[in-house]
Image (cartoon, helix red, strand yellow):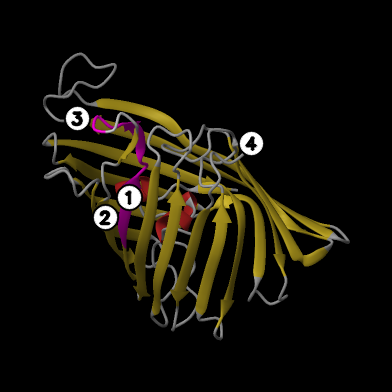
Amino acid sequence: TTLTLDNAEISLSNRLQFRFIDEIPAGNVRLPGTTVAGQSKPSFRIRRAKTSLEGWFWKKELTYEIQLSWAGPEAGASTQTPLEDALLTWDASKKGSFMITLGQFKVPLGRQEMTSSGRLQFADRSLLNGEFTRGRDIGIQVRGRVGNDKVEYFAGMFNGNPASRVSNDNTKLQYNARVSIEPMGKVAYSESAFEGWDKPLLAIAAQFENNDLSGATNLTDLNTTILGADFVYKYKGFSLFAEYFNRKRKPEAVSGTSSATSGPATQSTGSFQSNGYNVEAGYFLKRDKLEIAARFAGYDPSSKTASNNHREKGGVVNYYILKHTLKVMADFRALRDEESRQTNKELRVQTQFIF
């Protein structure tokens, strides 16, 4: 629904995801609410229910967006309040090449994280996404499209702590940067190959994040630097998406007492690395209607610990009634923890309405 006034425009939209999920634990795991280990647990839930208000006021180059979540925060989300997005953007170039955004919104790290949950190929993002990206934060960024609309860039500064906080946790800020090259035309942040039937579409991106939580009140005060890359290809109903993250973490030095000098000393557990990947491929069996896809993802939480990788593999069948606006999706995935040697599985059937 869109309301247009003399000096403003207001668009209202809602997103609802109704889900059935059957959790199938490893044989020696007992889920809450079950009677024996290994027993599956079926549930119905409202996975997401969101309302968004967006538009422009005064001038068309001054836009805004507010998004609220009524079904509770996302799992591992950066915000614990109903307020997800609250941002104002000024297109200083008046042509999309230099835009300034301030407020609370998703930081530019991870193509899948930057893709709306309403435009995903699977019912949820991969396990890689929840480990390496934090979602929303409060800050300021510049972004735009240049090079004949073939290059997209982002650069921003943020608090570096969970969103909807009243202040920063420490004296440092989080810094992000992302550049995407799209030589064959603009590639929207939307999974599935609805685009690219007439000509191939390609996007290759690189990104950076540094978040120094030293001196903060968090339980684990780490200085984290992430380098990432992602790749998208769509053509004639086929889609391929891949992303990779390499993360370096340095724990905060801990002050103590030196036995040799009986004075203050500084101890550090040393830096460690972590990396992860996600690969998804899909194909439309019937154009814009029936799609199948597969996913393979995994990450290593710490290079200091051997055989502790986490892995995900799964498949999905999607039936689109009105593309992402109205669709039914059914996916099945297996989540493997190499450290505990346990594999948990789940079946998810979800219907989405955007209105």
In the displayed structure, 187 sits above or below 46; it is below
Q: Nearer the viewer, mark 1 or mark 3?
A: 1
**Distance between the Cα atoms at labels 3 and 4?**
39 Å
**Distance between the Cα atoms at labels 1 and 4?**
26 Å
Residue at the (40%, 36%) spot, across then down: 19
- Residue 8 pos. (x, y %): 82, 58
Residue highlighted by disc 4 = 166
Q: Amino acid at mark 2?
A: Gly
Q: Secondary structure at mark 1?
A: strand
Lateral position of residue 134 relative to residue 282, left or right: right
Residue highlighted by disc 1 = 249
Q: Nearer the viewer, mark 2 or mark 4?
A: 4
How crowded is the residue under tag 3: few (<14 C-alpha within 10 Å), some, or many (20+)?
many
Judged by its main secondary structure, the magenta piece is strand
> Does the segment drawn in magenta span residue 92?
no
In the displayed structure, 220 sits above or below 319; it is above
Residue at the (42%, 65%) spot, across then down: 207
* Image marks 3 and 2: residues in contact by CB distance under 8 Å: no
Residue highlighted by disc 2 = 276
